[in-house]
Image (cartoon, coloured by chain):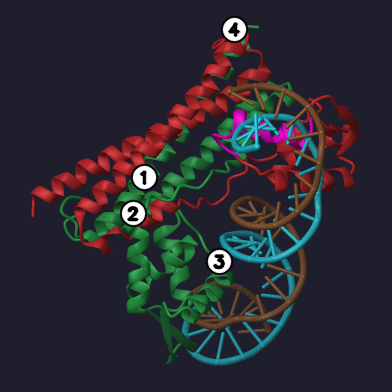
Chain colours: A red, B green, C brown, D cyan
Amino acid sequence: MSLEYILLGLLDEPATGYDLKKSFKFHLSHFWNANLSQIYPTLKKLEKNGLVTHEELSSPIGPDRKVYKRTAEGKEKLLEWLSGEPVMADSRVHFAAQVFFLSEKHDPETAIKFFKNLKIMFEERIARMSEIEKLFEESAPEFPDNMPDEYFYPYLTLRMGFHRIQASIDWCEESIKNLEKRKLSD
Amino acid sequence: MSLEYILLGLLDEPATGYDLKKSFKFHLSHFWNANLSQIYPTLKKLEKNGLVTHEELSSPIGPDRKVYKRTAEGKEKLLEWLSGEPVMADSRVHFAAQVFFLSEKHDPETAIKFFKNLKIMFEERIARMSEIEKLFEESAPEFPDNMPDEYFYPYLTLRMGFHRIQASIDWCEESIKNLEKRKLSD
DNA sequence: TGCCGCATGTAATTAGTTACATGATTTC
DNA sequence: GAAATCATGTAACTAATTACATGCGGCA
C-alpha cells in the first residue's frame, strides 16, 4: 500500500499521527490525502511489522503524544519502493464520466455551465497550490534553483500539480469554445 | 457511487455485464476501469433499486446472456447526476509520492531513470488513446467537427486524456532537465 | 488437446470514508 | 461560555482488487 510507504517517508522526522495528518494537509494535498482514522491503524500495522516504533511523551498543551520513529528496517523498505518501477494506478475521473454521458441532457447550456464550474474548481486548486509554493519560497534555501534535495524533490511534485491542473483548465476552455461553436452551426 | 451512474449511462443500449466490461476496456479506459467482479454485483444492486431490469436470452455462441435495460427511473437518476456539480475526488498519485521522497536515495541517476521510465509509461498511454481516437475517426459521422452529440461528448473526454497526459510528459522532461542541470552545478 | 473468447458469478481481502467517542488547553 | 486546536482512537460502511469457481463453443 502506498500510504504505508508515504508514512515511512514522512517519518524521516519523528512525528505523531496528528502531525502526519498536518503534513498531508499542508505539503502533500496536491497529490494525496489521508484521514486520521486511516493513519492511526496504519501506524499500528507498521509497528507490528517492525518498520516503526513509538514512545509516549507528555505534552504541555494537550494529551500525551505517541511519537513515531522509522526503524532501519523501515528505511530499507522505503528505499525498495523508491528503487522500483513508478506506480501507476488506473485513474477514476468522476467528472470525465459525467462529461461522457452529457449528451443525455440534450442541452448545450448545461454542458457549458458544467465546464465553467469545473474550470472554477481547477482554479481553486491552482490557488491552493500557490499557497504551498509560497511556503517553498519562504523556507527553501536557494529557491528555486539549487534547493537542497529535501526541498527539490517535493517541489517537483508541486510542478506536476501545476502542469496537470493547467492542462485541465486548457481542456475546459477548449471544450467551452467547441460547445459555443456547435450552438451556432445547427 | 459513480460506477452506478456509469452503468446507467452505458445502458442507454441494452447490454450484459460482459458487454459493459468491454465498454470500459475499449471506450472508457482513459478515465475509468471496472472489473467484472464489481460490475455484476452493481447490476444486481441497481436492479434491486428499480433502476435497471434484465431478461435472460440464450446465445448461439455461449451460455445464456442476462441482458440489462435501464428503466425510466434509472434514466431520471442519471439525469440528476448530470445536472449536479462536477464530482472531483481527492487524487492519489502514487508515483508523485515516490518522487516526493526520492531525496532519500541520494542519487540523481536513480531519479533520472525514474522519470525516463515514467515518461515511457505515459507515452504508452498516449498510444492507447490514439487507438481510441482511431475508432472515432472510423465510426463517428462528420469527425472531428459536427459529430453528433453521442460521439462529441465522449470525444471531449478523450481530449482531456491527451491534454493531461501531455502535461505529464512535459513535467517529466522538465524534471529530467532540472536533474541534469543539478548534476553539473555541484 | 489445449487455449481463447463468451458468460456467469462468489468469497476474501484491502483501502478509504463517515460517523461516533473522549477529553485537555488556549483563544475570542 | 463557545469555538478551535491538540491528541487519541474504534466501528460501520463503501468501493475496489484478487482469487476462486464453472462451463460452453470454436479454432489450431
- The label shown at residue A149 is none
Q: Disc 2 and disc 3: Cα gap in Å?
A: 22 Å
**Chain label for disc 3:** B
Q: Is residue B45 one of those drawn in magenta?
A: no
Which residue does the numbered mark 1 point to in the structure image? B160
Q: Earlier in the sequence, mark 4 or mark 2?
A: 2
CA distance for labels 1 and 2: 10 Å
Judged left or right of residue A100, residue A180 is: left
- Residue A176 higher or lower than A9, as above or below: below
Taking the image as shown, residue A183 lies to the left or right of residue B174, namely left
Secondary-structure class at tag 1: helix
Tell which of B68 and A33 is nearer to you: A33
Relative horizontal placement of residue A61, taking residue D5 as reference (left or right): right
Mark 2 Cα-neighbour bin, 10 Å: few <14, some 14–19, many ≥20: many
- State if disc 4 and disc 1 touch (CB < 8 Å): no
Q: Start and end of the magenta stretch?
A: A15-32
Residue B126: x %, y % from top left: 42, 45
Picture layout, residue B165 above or below residue A22:
below
The numbered mark, 3 or 1, whose residue comes first in the sequence reads: 3
Between the residue at mark 4 and the residue at mark 2, the CA separation in whole angstroms equals 43 Å
The residue wearing badge 3 is B35
Quarter that holds the C terminus of chain B: top right
Q: Nearer the viewer, mark 2 or mark 3?
A: 2
- What amino acid type is highlighted by mark number 4? Glu
Task: Establish if A101 lies above or below B186.
Answer: below
User: Disc number at residue A142?
Assistant: 4
Closer to the camera in the image, C16 or A152: C16
**Residue A24 is covered by the magenta coloring:** yes
Give the secondary structure at mark 3. loop
The reply to whether callout 1 and callout 2 are in contact (CB within 8 Å) is yes
